[in-house]
Image (cartoon, coloured by chain):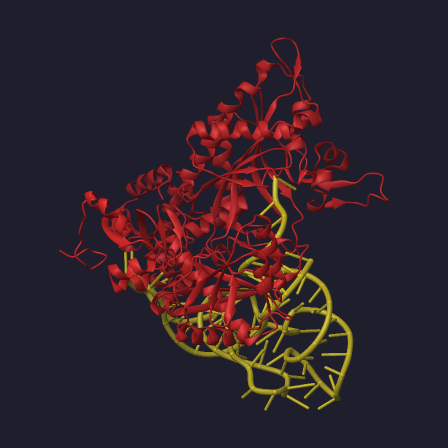
Amino acid sequence: MLHPVLGVKPFFIPIAMRTEKERKIVMVKICLKGDVVKEFEQGTTVAQIAAALGAGLAKAACAAKIDGKVCDLRTPVLADCSVEILTFEDTDGKKAFWHTASHILAQAVQRLFPEAKFAIGPAVDNGFYYDFDVPTSFTTDQLSTIEAEIAKIVKEDIPLEKLELDAPDALEKMKDQPYKVELINEHAGKGEKISFYVQGDFVDLCAGPHLMSTGSIKAVKLTACTGAYWRGSEKNKMLCRVYGTAFPKKSELEAYLAAVEEAKKRDHNIIGRQLKYFCTSDYVGQGLPHLMPKGAKLFQILNRYVQDKEEYEYGYVMTRTPLMAKSDLYKVSGHWDHYKDGMFVLGDEEKDKEVFALRPMTCPFQYQVYLNDMHSYRDLPIRYGETSTLFRNEASGEMHGLIRVRQFTISEGHLVLRPEQLEEEFRSCVRLIQEIMTDIGLIGDLTYRLSKWDPNDTEKYIGTPEMWNESEGLMRGILDHMGMKYTEAVGEAAFYGPKLDVQIKNVHGKEDTLCTVQIDLMLARQFNMTYIDADGEKKYPYIIHRTSLGCYERTIALLLEKYAGALPMWLSPEQVRVLPIGDNQSAYANDVAKKLRAKGLRVTVDERREKIGYKIREAQLEKIPYMLVIGEKEIEAGGVAVRSRKEGDKGTMPVEDFISAAVAEVESKAK
RNA sequence: GCUGCUAUGGCUCAGUUGGUAGAGCACGUCCUUGGUAAGGACGAGGUCACGCGUUCGAAUCGCGUUAGCAGCUCCA
């Protein structure tokens, strides 16, 4: 029997043979599908091990793991260990592959543009990039030239070799490359050896791992050329970043490019306009989408659902507070100091007696409602909810369809509570989000992020390190109690407290925050919000800031992408379209529509004098869940011929039967 | 805000080296009363995003503005 991966006979060597160690034989457990234990001479490289296991594997090998640690193919085995050969199928193998591709790109640029200075060139989620400092950004034609040079380098099948130098030698080697010098100096501070990879006439500072030679990268495509700041700071020079992707086979590259094109067809920014959910206007301005009747209806469906859920199931009370306020309010909240650039300020501070600003959040407004009364500890928690329109003056390059806009509406809420109520209320906020996301079908696409402050950037935040430690510790504790999986991110907190951000990726793979739950131990003090505790003392409450559905515009965008425009029945702006075949059926068709509307279904009648096939085609393209065809036969039978968007012609049935099935589908919120 | 790309009827797009605009869909009128994804004829519709320049002449070339796209940075 042959090994399914190796194509060789699997064999096992008894552990007892370890006594042969003085012959400098090491035992290597090779982890593939079904473990193999084999002996190699000490110093054998991973590449040689892969070769010993089969030529095919050696060719496919991109990197390896020795005892779980990712390493280069050139790494020798020095002692008994477990080795896992990584191919393009493995995440880390893929990284090594793309990373090598980025070196090839850099080598091509070096050959074609000798004056170019090199910054960094890592692997990313779907390929790689390399940042170059060149006098002018590459044109599309130049990218093609570079691609051709890359093909040459691949064909030359140049071996990559690893080189380790002490800092002074490293600096000497890279003396003409200012960005590399900066990087070397940083590493030198840590007293490490500096590692390089050499491929022919090209040398790059790099930790690896890398493939053995340039020949393995059969299909490379440079996908974009854009600007990117050196070290990610806008204070630094903008470099020319070339993005690319690469695959072991040309067919895989083609499949990838086709998949990217396919994903674009789901882009809400295209589909949402096509299906007339929203539009924009040059006269109105950037980041100000207009929800058209279908978009507005979807907004209303979601909003009613969320408001009812919050009020009847989660004990919220609603507020409706102003969309603007004097600057005084924002000075107390801290927004004037920490967020003024992001606000739309009405008036001129120098000239006008009073300056107003459109609100970028709801917090201080709902706090005014709280401050209007004296509160007992018995009143808490108080849960304020509001469907709240906000205005944020985003930089001009940031706007994107419905995902990033300047005016938007969120399901905002603030919970004022006693410290001992924090965990229960926090959990309930998370549960509310998860229930909503389950109902709308996005639950499986979410990830969770604990967003922390940046202790090295105290300008950006209010409060003391002690308070931050406390609030972050509280949040982490609760999340751990809940057994939630989450990542932690430094510098992503609100200026007043840490956040649990619920993240989602759009069709382009770009991640955004959909919902957030924040713990705030600071703003109650700023606003002097208190309650009288059981002991008669005034105390500061804790506050949770949260959204439940989040930003409606953004959620609508992600729903359109998730379902490629074919929204579940309960969310469809138009659920049923009645299609009379001729004028004679108009009255009956309107009668059917009336019966459906009486049960709360959203129905239209297409009475145009068009062929039935034409009407069906239009309704199908508009993704209407059900079409009811009405001809003489249906009138005679007193029924409707049902056509489902998903399953096509379902045959004739009594109107009442269709209604009960449709209502059941709406109520079940079936996807 | 930064880098690059883009802007032609409601939509999707043609428009060759500068010589005052085309198609399909949609829209209107008429004919067709049609059975599960496009029936036919005719018609109307454009200051080629906006402004300034170069030129005898600009959709086409240059500059600026506005808006859209990708990326960077930012995102309470």
Residue A103 versus residue A36 in the image, above or below: below
The spot of residue A595 in percent (x, y) is 37, 41
Q: Is residue B56 left or right of residue A265?
A: right
> Which quadrant of the rendered structure holds the N terminus of chain A?
bottom left
In the image, A116 versus A587, the foreground residue is: A116
Q: Quadrant of residue A564?
A: bottom left
The spot of residue A582 in percent (x, y) is 35, 59
The spot of residue A587 in percent (x, y) is 38, 50
Residue A111 versus residue A377 in the image, above or below: below
Q: Quadrant of residue B7?
A: bottom right
In the image, A460 versus A609, the foreground residue is: A460
Q: Please name the residue shown 35% across and 37% down the image.
A: A668
Q: Residue furthest top?
A: A535
Q: Residue furthest left?
A: A1
Residue A399 appears anywhere in the view: yes
Q: Quadrant of residue B57?
A: bottom right
User: Which color has been applied to chain B in this rendered view?
Assistant: yellow
User: Which color has been applied to chain A in this rendered view?
Assistant: red
The spot of residue A186 in percent (x, y) is 60, 52
